[in-house]
């Protein structure tokens, strides 16, 4: 679950070098509980919600949010996965990598959809997600939950639920995993 410029795949032959840990695993779990409570409060319950995780970085956090919302509200919220690779506006600039499947088990018409991703950067992945969601029905509303908002938006996209605002330089990388959140950069791998 590494996010970096333009959301491209991890560079081959390069390794992520962590410079600093900005959130621990416990911090990340607390953030997810807070976001689950915010989602329920903002929507006056969970009855009309559908949670959709963006492949691949947002998927595990979306799964966990669904469980937390169920524990807190008592409502089993439908869960889906969305691959936006073919909807990206930079598809001609980079190869399409092996896709993770889209699996949205219900029609989204008249539902409130909460898109979940690990890192929000330029906003282009979210724009692609909005296009992809339209193929699955006309949602009443679409909301965005991100674990990290690192700024540098290129499109007018704003998250509704944020784990942490983390201003970064353009050349920095952010790694979000169950171990926590780290900032670093990619370096050439020594084992070739």
Image (tube, rainbow, N blue to C red):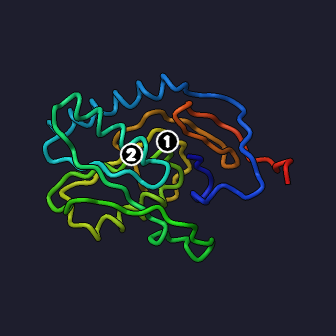
Marking on residue 149: 1
Residue at 45%, 38% (x, y): give it: 147
Q: Is residue 180 left or right of residue 50?
A: right
Q: In this view, does 106 lie above or below 162?
A: below
Q: In this view, does 141 lie to the left or right of 160?
A: left
Residue at 34%, 43% (x, y): give it: 160
Percent position of residue 152, x then y: 56, 50
Residue at 55%, 66% (x, y): give it: 98
Circle 2 residues within 10 Å: few <14, some 14–19, many ≥20 = some
Q: Mark 2 points at which residue?
A: 159
Circle 1 residues within 10 Å: few <14, some 14–19, many ≥20 = many
**Mark 1: secondary structure:** strand
Quick check: marks 1 and 2 in contact, CB under 8 Å?
A: yes
Percent position of residue 177, x then y: 54, 38
The quadrant of the picture occupied by the C terminus is bottom right
Residue at 49%, 41% (x, y): give it: 149
């Amino acid at each position: 679950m590494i996010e970096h410029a333009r959301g491209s795949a991890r560079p081959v032959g390069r390794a992520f070098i962590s410079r600093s840990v900005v959130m621990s695993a416990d911090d990340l779990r607390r953030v997810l509980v807070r976001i689950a409570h915010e989602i329920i409060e903002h929507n006056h319950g969970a009855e009309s919600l559908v949670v959709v995780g963006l492949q691949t970085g947002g998927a595990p956090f979306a799964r966990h949010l669904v469980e937390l919302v169920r524990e807190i509200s008592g409502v089993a919220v439908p869960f889906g996965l969305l691959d936006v690779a073919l909807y990206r506006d930079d598809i001609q600039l980079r190869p399409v990598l092996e896709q993770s499947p889209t699996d949205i088990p219900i029609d989204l018409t008249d539902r409130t959809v909460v898109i979940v991703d690990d890192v929000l950067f330029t906003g282009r992945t979210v724009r692609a997600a909005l296009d992809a969601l339209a193929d699955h029905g006309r949602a009443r509303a679409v909301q965005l939950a991100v674990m990290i908002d690192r700024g540098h938006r290129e499109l007018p996209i704003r998250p509704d639920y944020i784990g942490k605002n983390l201003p970064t330089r353009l050349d920095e990388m952010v790694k979000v995993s169950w171990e926590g959140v780290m900032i670093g950069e990619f370096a050439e791998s020594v084992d070739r």
